Amino acid sequence: MIIPLIAALLPPFLLWLYICLKDPRPEPVSQLFKAVLYGMLVSVPIVLVEAVFEAALANIGLTSATVVGTTAQAFLVAAIPEETFKLLALWLILRKNPYFDEHFDGIVYAVCVGLGFAAVENVLYVLSQEDWLSVAVARSLLAVPGHYAFAILMGYYYSLHHFVSHSDRTAALILIAPVLAHGIYDALAMSGQANPYIGGIAFLVLIYFCIRMHKFSYRKVVAQIQRDKDEENVIS
């Protein structure tokens, strides 16, 4: 039990450590752990909402037996509920947070929330499978980094709206960007349940999509760090 648990928690921990070490002006550890805890706590309402949505889709015939069904589940059962509750957790963390004073902070806190949820999800998936090792390896390469990238998108647009642009478009992108990325990811990953031939092609597309998504996310990380450096130079 201990080794599978470590295997499930190590990938989110390493990504959490990476993003925290990227911060030129680190946030208080108590605030970081609070954000992770919030991410873990929202997994409870997420599971309940997802169960309701999945049952509703099954009642109208949208199951994993069809590509349309898997796509609907990817967005309505996974992406929308998960990213919405993660955004709620992020808002609760940042709305009166005096340490939220730099562009990069939005990404840091969003990643803490996202990886808190990813840790809970990963433990549930890994510990529920007899072949836990292959599940842990697969999720460490795709699912956990996926949540990390979705969180970067959310945090980037959250900070952009808070510090730079207060437009409705930017506000909408705080949720729309991670939902689209998450929904597309899950739709590609789940398509094999409906059709193994489509699933094989979709897996190749998924790998390409993940590479592009992570490159895009990394550019957002660099951009926010540079923004903070530029503002610091102007002030000094």
Image: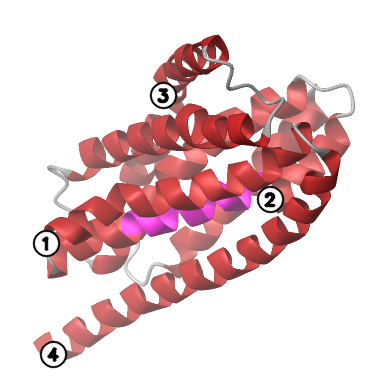
Is residue 146 located in the magenta-colored stretch of the structure? yes
Report the disc number at residue 234: 4
Span of residues in magenta: 143-155
> Amino acid under label 2?
Leu
> Amino acid under label 1?
Ser
- Decide which of tag 4 and tag 2 comes sooner along the chain: 2
Q: Residues within 10 Å of mark 3 (few under 14, many from 20)?
A: some
The percent coordinates of residue 229 (x first, y second) are: 27, 83
Q: Which residue is mark 1?
A: 167
Which residue is drawn at the image coordinates 57% and 37% (left, top)?
71
Is residue 66 located in the magenta-colored stretch of the structure? no
**Alpha carbon distance from label 2 to label 1:** 33 Å
The percent coordinates of residue 211 (x first, y second) are: 64, 67
**Alpha carbon distance from label 3 to label 2:** 23 Å
**Alpha carbon distance from label 4 to label 3:** 40 Å
Q: Is residue 203 above or below residue 33?
A: below
- Label 2: state its secondary structure: loop
Which is closer to the viewer, label 4 or label 2?
2
- Decide which of tag 1 and tag 3 comes sooner along the chain: 3
The percent coordinates of residue 145 (x first, y second) are: 61, 53
Q: Nearer the viewer, residue 211 or 35?
A: 211
Q: Which residue is mark 2?
A: 142
Residue 12 shown left or right of residue 171 in the figure: right
Report the disc number at residue 41: 3
Which residue is drawn at the image coordinates 19% and 59% (left, top)?
169
> Amino acid under label 3?
Leu
